[in-house]
Image: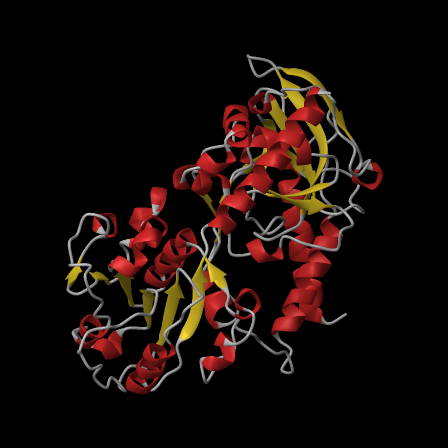
């Protein structure tokens, strides 16, 4: 062993011995002891060796934290099992004992033993009373954890009073420590599924979102056609940037739009919902990209206006666009919530004038146009070849696309329009599927 390796190994062993008090056996005899210092020291040495390897390669990775919604009681009832892989935010303390609401020595998630993105697994449970005194517990040596078993079959566990023992590896001889069940923000799988917490290596941001309660489940199942956007947004997760990931990256540039038009529209034109447009605009804005949103309000889209305007609980996301324009025979710059109340003379459709009047058009990264693709004014679309972004047309109907309009936009902007169809029914169907699963969970817990 090289001399520098001996020095690092000795330092790591010394540090582990100094930290031993943090893992002393707790007074409630839950059996937490010192982590395996030798293996951790060897891992640090291996890390240093990699860093000094001249042949090592580097890759660019996403350095942003992952936004999550903390699991509610129903998710914990269903998924919090022995062997569940969990994510715990940086800075959370894990204690030698659960008694007293955490007692004895402690460590902190994010230290050298538990860096963000480490796979942490559930190895035991403890229940405290109203005075935070230990009522009952069951903990296993990680090697003998009964993976996928439930701690108890009780319905209506008070998770605010539950603490969970966590461990790093099945080969460890003891758990790492105890944390409140409520500190767990992701239940990400189960031991042995070959997955990991690696995608959370840059941390997590916990977003507030109302839970799906049993009353909401019952109401939605009784009246599935009456689910409003606010409820759908409560139920569904963040869809990410669907415009970028599906409409653009998932669709080869069509070249001649007729190649799309004569295919089965359901197969050839990707679908997107108003909610997904809103979330995509927010993602663009958060990444510093400039977006223009143009909303058709002419008579020919009258029957689709409620779908176009169904922003529900996410108007604030849509309004992050740099400019929002509603157009018909005339056009006006608006906020998203003004779409239905703004009079732009629906007796005609002039799609080109608002495009011609976009100031500094070359600065826009994306132009999103929600329209049936009609243009019946005499306005001629001006050349805008300085624009290097992408144009997405979202059509509320795909039975009669005006190909000449798409061709003229292609020519004027020296680009290819990415075509998609507006279908808010997709969100409703997905929300109902999730609600049905929730109902099945309630039924199984009550059985």
The C terminus, quarter of image:
top right
Q: Quadrant of residue 160?
A: top right
Query: In the figure, is residue 405 to the left or right of 30?
Result: left
Vertical placement of residue 273 versus 259, above or below: above
Residue 340: percent from the left, percent from the top?
23, 49
Vertical placement of residue 87 versus 53, above or below: above
> Which residue shows up at 17% across the image and 78% down it?
378
Count of picture labels: 0
Residue 411: percent from the left, percent from the top?
32, 87
Residue 297: percent from the left, percent from the top?
25, 58
Query: In the figure, is residue 39 to the left or right of 398?
Result: right
Residue 299: percent from the left, percent from the top?
25, 58
Vertical placement of residue 17 versus 49, above or below: above
Question: Residue 353 versus residue 202: which sits nearer the camera?
Answer: 353
Name the outermost residue toward the right.
144
> Which residue shows up at 35% across the image and 59% down it?
281
The N terminus, quarter of image:
bottom right
> Which residue shows up at 28% across the image and 85% down it?
412
Q: Quadrant of residue 300?
A: bottom left
Query: In the figure, is residue 341 to the left or right of 407?
Result: left
Question: Residue 54 versus residue 315: which sits nearer the camera?
Answer: 315
Image color mode: secondary structure
Question: Residue 381 versus residue 357: which sits nearer the camera?
Answer: 381
């Amino acid at each position: 062993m090289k001399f520098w390796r001996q020095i690092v190994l000795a330092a790591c062993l010394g540090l582990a011995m100094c930290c031993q008090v943090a893992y002393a056996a707790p007074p409630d005899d839950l059996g937490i002891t010192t982590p395996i210092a030798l293996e951790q020291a060897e891992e640090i040495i291996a890390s240093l060796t990699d860093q000094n390897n001249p042949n090592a390669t580097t890759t660019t990775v996403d350095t942003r934290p992952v936004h999550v919604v903390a699991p509610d009681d129903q998710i914990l009832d269903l998924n919090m099992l022995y062997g569940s892989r969990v994510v715990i935010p940086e800075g959370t303390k894990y204690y030698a004992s659960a008694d007293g609401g955490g007692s004895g020595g402690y460590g902190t998630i994010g230290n050298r033993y538990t860096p963000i993105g480490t796979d942490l697994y559930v190895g035991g449970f403890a229940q405290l009373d109203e005075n935070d005194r230990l009522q009952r517990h069951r903990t296993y040596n990680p090697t003998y954890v009964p993976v996928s078993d439930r701690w108890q079959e009780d319905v209506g566990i008070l998770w605010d009073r539950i603490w969970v023992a966590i461990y790093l590896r099945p080969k460890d001889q003891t758990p790492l420590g105890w944390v409140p069940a409520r500190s767990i923000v992701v239940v990400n799988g189960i031991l042995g599924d070959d997955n990991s917490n690696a995608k959370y290596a840059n941390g997590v941001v916990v977003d507030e979102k109302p839970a799906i309660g049993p009353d909401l489940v019952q109401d939605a199942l009784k009246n599935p056609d009456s689910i409003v956007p606010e409820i759908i947004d409560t139920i569904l997760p963040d869809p990410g940037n669907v415009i970028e990931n599906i409409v653009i990256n998932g669709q080869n540039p069509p070249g001649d739009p007729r190649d799309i038009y004569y295919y089965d529209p359901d197969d050839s034109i990707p679908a997107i919902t108003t909610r997904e447009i809103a979330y995509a605009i927010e993602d663009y804005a958060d990444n510093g990209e400039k977006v223009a949103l143009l909303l058709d309000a002419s008579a020919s889209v009258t029957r689709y206006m409620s779908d176009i305007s169904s922003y529900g609980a996410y108007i604030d996301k849509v309004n992050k666009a740099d400019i929002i324009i509603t157009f018909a025979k005339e056009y006006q710059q608006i906020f998203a919530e003004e779409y239905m109340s703004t009079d732009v003379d629906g007796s005609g459709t002039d799609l080109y004038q608002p495009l011609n009047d976009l100031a500094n058009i070359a600065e826009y990264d994306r132009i999103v146009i929600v329209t049936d693709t009609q243009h019946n004014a005499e306005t001629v679309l001006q050349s805008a070849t300085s624009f290097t972004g992408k144009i997405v047309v979202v059509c509320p109907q795909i039975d009669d696309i005006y190909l000449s309009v798409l061709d003229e936009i292609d020519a004027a902007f020296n680009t290819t329009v990415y075509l998609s169809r507006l279908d808010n029914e997709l969100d409703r169907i997905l929300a109902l599927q999730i609600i049905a699963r929730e109902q099945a969970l309630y039924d199984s817990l009550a059985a």
